[in-house]
Image (cartoon, rainbow, N blue to C red):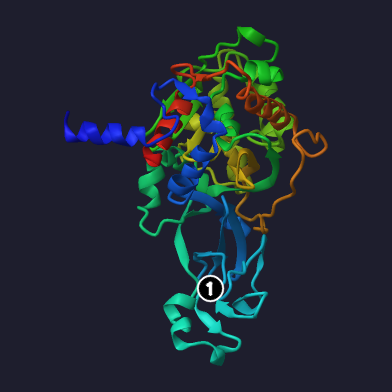
């Protein structure tokens, strides 16, 4: 046996409930405490994570806290508008320094316990009772706030808790380029809210790695086609690093019925207020009486959307309408964030463990859009945390998605169930995510 093969077998053996077959997922990966603890150590402490949107900290001294599996970091906007991230703990007696979101008065991070202070760049600026400490307890390199790695991409701040981590682009570049093609950097928050689900973080996100659940979970989106809706109407791709995507094949054909296309977009606007939004519907409605026999619906939509956006001062890069993702699709960036672009907008999900428990997760949802350049840039804030069944605060489509997730988690514990069996193409993204997770855990 070669040394390389021996190393691979040894690594695989070190991962409990490993993916021994590409299209079968052992059920224990979603609830076993030992597996969860290994994820904390090998994944969450060592991977790039989208910690906040730049819109959450628009001005110098603005901060926001990011939590993941007992770890807390705060991101703070610097005087030069760059961003730094710090482990959220006072080096005196472990008090957390920042909670939630806000702004540091006078550019000073102040410990609420004994009043020690730091500049927003992390440098110690005041120690109350300094004369009472031995000099070796107050070394600058030990009492300055400890930084974590920070990079900015996609109008968001990404962090890595591992000081030896490589660059963000090396981690997400293969799939992130697809989002650059549809101008992710132009998206801003329309609304943002969250829920707590009684389900493992991986279980909660796997529904969004495929589009063929729409037929049963979102029957209204099939416009009456029901089971006649082909499950292979999307093109699926996987990428190194655990990322995946699917996209509409609209560029390979044209819409055959404008009313069907209009109705489908209207359902997204009404049932989601994301991807397709009210202003898009006004543009689409205006096309109805401009189409002649044999006209390309796709070309008409692209032309009218560009004319509207340019007139309204909404950025629309040249040729973006030739990208399949501009029309519809999904990009998943490992380990836990999704973007579903459409017409210069996007739905986005971020899912992470909650309360240090393998069977609970925190599920955030954003509606993102490209605003006119003249639109005032207000600070983005979480609208609130709402129950998964709260129809007064959740649009219909998320409620429909939430309805299955906890039922899946409960199903894992039913006697006789051994694990998931995945469709070769439509669920390849799920398999790709799990195999990347095993690589990192090993």
In the image, 327 versus 304, the foreground residue is: 327
Percent across and percent down for residue 367 are 65, 41
The relative height of residue 140 versus residue 327 in the rendered view (above or below) is: below
In the image, 124 versus 190, the foreground residue is: 124
Q: Number of labelled discs?
A: 1
Residue at position x 53%, y 29% in the image? 28
Percent across and percent down for residue 254 are 52, 17
The quadrant holding residue 402 is top right
Please identify the quadrant where the N terminus is shown: top left
In the image, 10 versus 232, the foreground residue is: 10
Pointer 1 residue = 91
Percent across and percent down for residue 357 are 61, 43
Residue at position x 55%, y 78% in the image? 118
In the image, 280 versus 289, the foreground residue is: 280
Residue at position x 35%, y 47% in the image? 170
The relative height of residue 285 versus residue 81 in the rendered view (above or below) is: above
Q: Is residue 126 visible?
A: yes
């Amino acid at each position: 046996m070669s040394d390389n093969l021996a190393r691979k077998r040894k690594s695989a053996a070190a991962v409990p409930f490993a993916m021994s077959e590409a299209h079968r997922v052992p059920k224990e990966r979603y609830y076993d405490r030992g597996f969860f603890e290994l994820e904390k150590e090998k994944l969450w402490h060592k991977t790039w994570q989208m910690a906040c949107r730049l819109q959450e900290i628009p001005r110098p001294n603005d901060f926001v806290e990011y939590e993941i599996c007992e770890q807390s970091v705060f991101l703070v906007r610097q005087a030069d508008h760059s961003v730094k991230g710090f482990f959220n703990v006072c080096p005196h007696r472990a008090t957390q320094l920042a909670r939630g979101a806000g702004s540091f008065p006078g550019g000073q991070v102040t410990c609420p316990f004994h009043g020690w202070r730091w500049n927003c760049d992390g440098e110690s600026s005041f120690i109350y009772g300094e004369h009472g400490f031995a000099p070796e307890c107050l070394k600058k390199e030990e009492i300055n706030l400890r930084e974590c790695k920070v990079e900015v991409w996609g109008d968001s701040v990404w962090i890595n808790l591992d000081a030896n981590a490589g660059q963000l682009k090396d981690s997400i570049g293969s799939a992130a380029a697809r989002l650059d093609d549809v101008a992710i950097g132009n998206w801003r928050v329309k609304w943002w809210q969250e829920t707590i689900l009684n389900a493992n973080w991986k279980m909660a996100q796997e529904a969004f790695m495929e589009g063929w659940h729409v037929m049963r979970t979102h029957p209204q989106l099939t416009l009456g086609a029901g089971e006649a809706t082909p499950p292979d109407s999307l093109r699926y791709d996987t990428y190194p690093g655990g990322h995946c995507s699917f996209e509409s094949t609209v560029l390979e054909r044209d819409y055959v019925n404008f009313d069907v296309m209009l109705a489908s977009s209207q359902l997204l606007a009404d049932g989601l207020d994301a991807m397709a939004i009210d202003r898009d519907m006004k543009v689409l409605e205006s096309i109805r009486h401009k189409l002649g026999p044999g006209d390309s619906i796709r070309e008409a939509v692209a032309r009218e959307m560009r004319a509207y956006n340019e007139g309204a001062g909404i950025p629309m890069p040249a040729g973006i309408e030739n990208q399949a993702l501009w029309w519809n699709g999904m990009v998943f960036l490992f380990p836990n964030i999704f973007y579903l672009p459409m017409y210069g907008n996007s739905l986005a999900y971020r899912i992470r463990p909650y309360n240090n428990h393998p069977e609970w997760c925190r599920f955030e949802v954003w509606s993102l859009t490209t605003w006119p350049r003249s639109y005032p840039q207000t600070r983005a804030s979480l609208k609130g945390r709402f129950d998964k069944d709260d129809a007064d605060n959740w649009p219909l489509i998320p409620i429909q998605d939430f309805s299955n997730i906890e039922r899946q988690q409960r199903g894992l514990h039913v006697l006789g169930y051994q694990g998931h069996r995945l469709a070769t193409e439509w669920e390849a993204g799920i398999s790709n995510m799990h195999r990347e997770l095993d690589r990192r855990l090993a």
